[in-house]
Amino acid sequence: MEELSVIVEQVSSFLWSWPMIVLLLGTHLYLTIVLKFPQRKIFTAIKLSVVKDKTGSGDVSQFGALATSLAATIGTGNIIGVATAVALGGPGAVFWCWITGVLGIATKYSEGLLAIKYRVKTEDGTMIGGPMYALERGLNMKWLAMLFCIFTAIASFGIGNTVQSNAIALLLNETYSVPPITSGILVSMATALVILFGIKGIAKVCGALVPFMAIFYVLCCLVILYINSPYLKETFTLIFNSAFSARAAGGGFVGTTVMMAARFGIARGLFSNESGLGSAPIVAAAAQTRNPVRQALVSSSGTFWDTVVVCALTGLVLVGSIIAHPNIDHTQGAALTKVAFDKIPIVGSLVLSVGIVTFAFSTILGWSYYGEKAVEYLGGEKVVIYYRLMWIAAVFVGAILNLSLVWSVADSMNALMAIPNLIALLLLSKVVVKETNKFLWSGNIDRDDPDTI
């Protein structure tokens, strides 16, 4: 088992090395250019996300679809993941993480557009879509669509399920002495109460949970930044300078280089917002929208909130805490996060606990839908109920087992998910450009598309 763990970790490290980072970031940059910088429409996207499109077909509102995708992306990676990037790559990693969010908006936009363009209506009237349907219907590559679904189904039980319940159980055990078996029972029961109602149940809970947890977390970060306000200017300066100069890192970040800052910052940003992985368009396909571009814009706002806002705030909090407390051990991501949130008097540890628990639970809900649709594509609707039961059981198992091997397997599957999705994005980029020119840049964003509704 130990040898297997080493092999899997090596495979995971290879898959998430520079070739994958260059491929993802290159796709972000390419789509940004050919789509004429859709990032400049981000405030329009935010506005559309909270307006119900009553003329469109779909199973959930645009906000419900966005909340579900945010539930899966705004997770423990936004807290511990950013801390790990800072620990390994230095303060400059925060800058590169932010850059991936800005550029990733174009990729998330393209994924959402293709999800609506190639979605299908089932016999019971529900809408389903995602990279597998773009590959099958847009490129006639059903074999690659099936591979994407296999990778997604496997990844979902890892990164979206067991490791999240394990994070909850460990936190509650270490902080409040709650037995892991108790945490497993409670979390699996809560999961069952939501996912057995399908996408409408998931979207309803996520629509309530995501705004609460995001606003709560952002407010706490702002409180910490206020406490560290004497160091705020120095924090911004250190982050920016460290992104381009190894010597500027300072603060005890011995051994960090510009390449390390870029590698860990970009990798964490890509992993956090999931732009290019192909997960978010699966739920985007269920949205009520009158044309593909409207949902594409709403989808793109998810990357804005996840990385441009939440990850950036986390990075500022962490680097500011390092400057304020130069003697703390900044090489351990979890410890660094704890020190940062302890700046909030009395309730600091509680704030961190609530953040991690709500983020992890929402990720379980969001990824349950991704995995379900992948399994449904492979085996039909008849397998969905069995998948849901397995999902609930896996939540319990994850809470009571050591999951170091599962983490590595899930990381590998996430990387393998991205490859078919990126093929679809690049080969169908002309379709995305055509639809964008037709509805967005021609001022027809409110126009109905017969193929969509």
Image: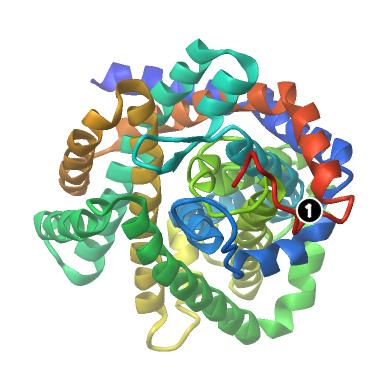
Rendered location of residue 106, percent (x, y): 75, 44
Look at the picture and state if 22 lies above or below 63.
above
Q: Secondary structure at mark 1?
A: helix
Rendered location of residue 8, percent (x, y): 39, 21
Q: Quadrant of the N terminus?
A: top left
Q: Quadrant of residue 430?
A: top right
Look at the picture and state if 337 lies above or below 367.
below
Residue 332 can be seen in this image = no
| Residue at which label 1 appears | 242
Residue at 66% across / 43% down in the picture? 450
Q: Quadrant of residue 134?
A: top right
Q: Quadrant of residue 310?
A: bottom right
User: What amino acid is found at the position of numbered circle 1 in the picture?
Assistant: Ser
> Relative to the observer, which residue lies in front, 186 or 200?
200
Rendered location of residue 121, percent (x, y): 46, 37
Residue at 67% across / 52% down in the picture? 300
Horizontal side of residue 117 vs 391, given as left or right: right
> Relative to the observer, which residue lies in front, 196 or 324?
196
Residue at 44% across / 61% down in the picture? 335
Here the colouring is rainbow
Number of numbered labels in the structure image = 1
Look at the picture and state if 247 lies above or below 380.
below
Horizontal side of residue 166 vs 371, given as left or right: left
Rendered location of residue 413, percent (x, y): 44, 27
Q: Residues within 10 Å of mark 1 (few under 14, many from 20)?
A: many
Residue at 38% across / 84% down in the picture? 347
Residue 28 can be seen in this image = yes
